[in-house]
Image (cartoon, grey):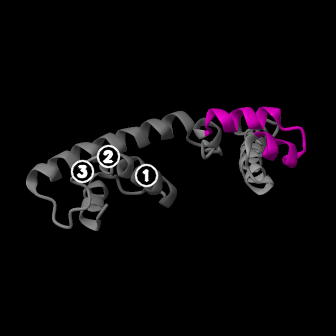
Amino acid sequence: MTTAEAAVLDAQLPAGLTDEMRDVALCLYEAMVLTDQRAGQAHPDAGWRQVLGYMARVAAIQLQHLAEQKGGRAIYLAKGVAVHLTERDRRMCEEFRGDYDVLAKRYDLTPMRVRQIVGTWQLEQFRRRQGQLPGLDAEHGYQG
């Protein structure tokens, strides 16, 4: 995404947003922009600017909705590793009992690769559970 394309969003965002809110809006906007083959224009033509304007309005609406629903809370956004695991990787994580070599042989992988897959999955699971511990979330008084 070019600076010119990003500027369309900047023009739509209200003054007074925090840097984090601007960053979230940019992430939402960029995700939409990058799905279009016209993305990457240093000088967007009128038609593309109109589409960018629509995407910027959608990103601003999404940001407002997120602020209304989740504002004032510390939230953890997982990278979604578990969602993107292949069926093989998911089985491997479910079967893991502490021995990387066993799974490496079973799945014809190196122990290091098994360690990477299982370790990434375990870290995400740990972080997800941490956000649910009593006293560590906004609902129970933790303000981050």
- Which region is colored magenta? 85-106
Q: Residue at x 85, y 48 (%)?
A: 100
Q: Secondary structure at mark 1?
A: helix
Of pointers 3 and 1, the one earlier in the residue sequence: 1
Q: Amino acid at mark 3?
A: Gln
Of pointers 2 and 1, the one earlier in the residue sequence: 1
Q: Is residue 22 left or right of residue 128?
A: left
Q: Amino acid at mark 2?
A: Thr
Q: Amino acid at mark 1?
A: Cys
Q: Is residue 104 above or below residue 129?
A: below
- Whether the magenta-drawn stretch holds residue 98 is answered as yes
Q: Is residue 99 left or right of residue 94?
A: right
Q: Secondary structure at mark 2?
A: loop
Q: Residue at x 67, y 35 (%)?
A: 88
Q: Secondary structure at mark 3?
A: loop
Circle on res. 37: 3
Between 35 and 12, which is closer to the camera in this rendering? Answer: 35
